[in-house]
Every structure is written in structure tokens, then in C-alpha cells.
Amino acid sequence: MFIDIIVTFLLSISPLGEARVGIPYGIINDIHPFVAFFVGTAANLLVFPILYMLIEVFNKKLWNFHFYRKYVIKLARRSKKLMGDNLQKYGVWGLMVFVMIPLPGTGAYMGTIAASLFNIRKREAFIAVSVGTIISSIIIATGTHFSLMGIKMF
């Protein structure tokens, strides 16, 4: 069971699925839903401070390198295409809703990148990404738990 908790944590902090993969993994592997929710959400909440710091450091150190600048510009275009108009129109609320929607390509990683690219103040961005992550985790945990309850009935 301890290994499953560690895997839940690692899946939830990874950019491949975030808590959208970690929490269901934990619940499916018989971790109590509240424990899976807490571990997955806590891991996913760590994304913002770590990634935001890395973005700042990399931008300062690597901006003069052509390949890095080209990649960042490509990422900025993708981020703007996904949520640019809504983020500029709704600001922090738009960022929170974007992170909150449990779909691929949304979440704490893309929300943090978008907050950095659109120069949203760090404190406001952290609150928006955190609230969005928590709400998304609640949706995922509840959906997974009740889906498994329905499957076990048959």
C-alpha cells in the first residue's frame, strides 16, 4: 500500500497526467479515496512553485540561446491558442477555470506556464492554480470513487 501511495504522488506531480491520473490510480489500487485525494492534490499543488521558479531561472539563463527562445515562443503560441482570449478577458478567474477543467492539456502545468507567459502576478496566479487544482481533484476523486462503486455493484 505504501508503494501505491508513492506512485500516486509521483503520477500526480508528473506532467503526463497530474492528479487526473494519480488520484484514480490510488483509488483503483485500494487506497482510501480521501488519502488518494490528499496525496494527489498535495503533489499537484507542488507543481506551481517548482515550475514557476524553474521558468524564471531558465528564462534568465537561457533566453539568449536560439533553440530555447524558439521553444518558448512555440509554447507561448500553443498556450495563447488554448486560452489566450479567455485569460486576457477573465484574468485570474479564467486561469482558475482553465486549470479546473479535468481535460488533457489543462491543469497546473499549463496554468503555471500560461500565468508566466501572460505576466499574471505570482500570488494571484498561485491562488488561481491552487483553487483550480483542488476543484479538479475533487471532481476526479468523486467521479472515480462513484464509478468504482457502480462497477462493484455488478
Image (tube, helix red, strand yellow):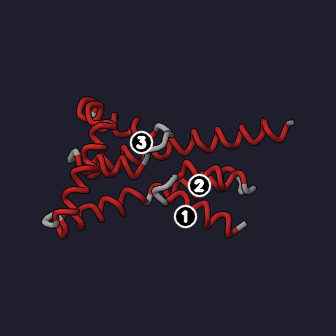
Query: What residue lies at 73% left-to-right and 66% top-to-bottom?
Result: 1
Q: Is residue 10 left or right of residue 120?
A: right
- Residue that numbered label 3 is attached to: 99
- Give the structural element (helix, strand or loop) at label 3: helix
- To which residue does mark 2 refer? 22
Residue 10 circle label? 1
* Viewer-side residue, 34 vs 50: 50
**Disc on the earlier residue, 2 or 1:** 1
The residue drawn where x is 43% and y is 46% is 107
Q: Are marks 2 and 1 in contact (CB under 8 Å)?
A: yes
Count of marks, rendered view: 3
Q: CA distance from mark 3 to mark 2?
A: 16 Å
Question: At x 71% / y 57%, what residue is drawn?
Answer: 31
Q: Residues within 10 Å of mark 1 (few under 14, many from 20)?
A: some
Which residue is more in the foreground, 45 or 4?
A: 4
Residue type of the residue flagged with mark 2: Gly
Disc 1 marks a residue whose amino acid type is Leu
Type of amino acid at the residue the image marks with label 3: Val
> Residue 143, image x and y in percent?
64, 38
Which image quarter: residue 15?
bottom left
- Dot 3, how many residues are within 10 Å of its Cα: few (below 14), some (14-19), or many (20+)? many
Q: Residue furthest right?
A: 154
Compared to residue 67, the image places residue 83 above or below, namely: above
For label 2, the crowd category at 10 Å Cα-Cα, with few meaning under 14, some 14 to 19 and many 20 or more, is many
Dot 3 or dot 2: first in sequence order is 2
Query: Could you tell me which quadrant the C terminus lies in?
Result: top right
As helix, strand or loop, the secondary structure at mark 1 comes to helix
Please state the horizontal and vertical placement of residue 110, each as a whole percent of the image.
Answer: 37, 48
- Is 154 positioned to the left or the right of 122 in the image? right
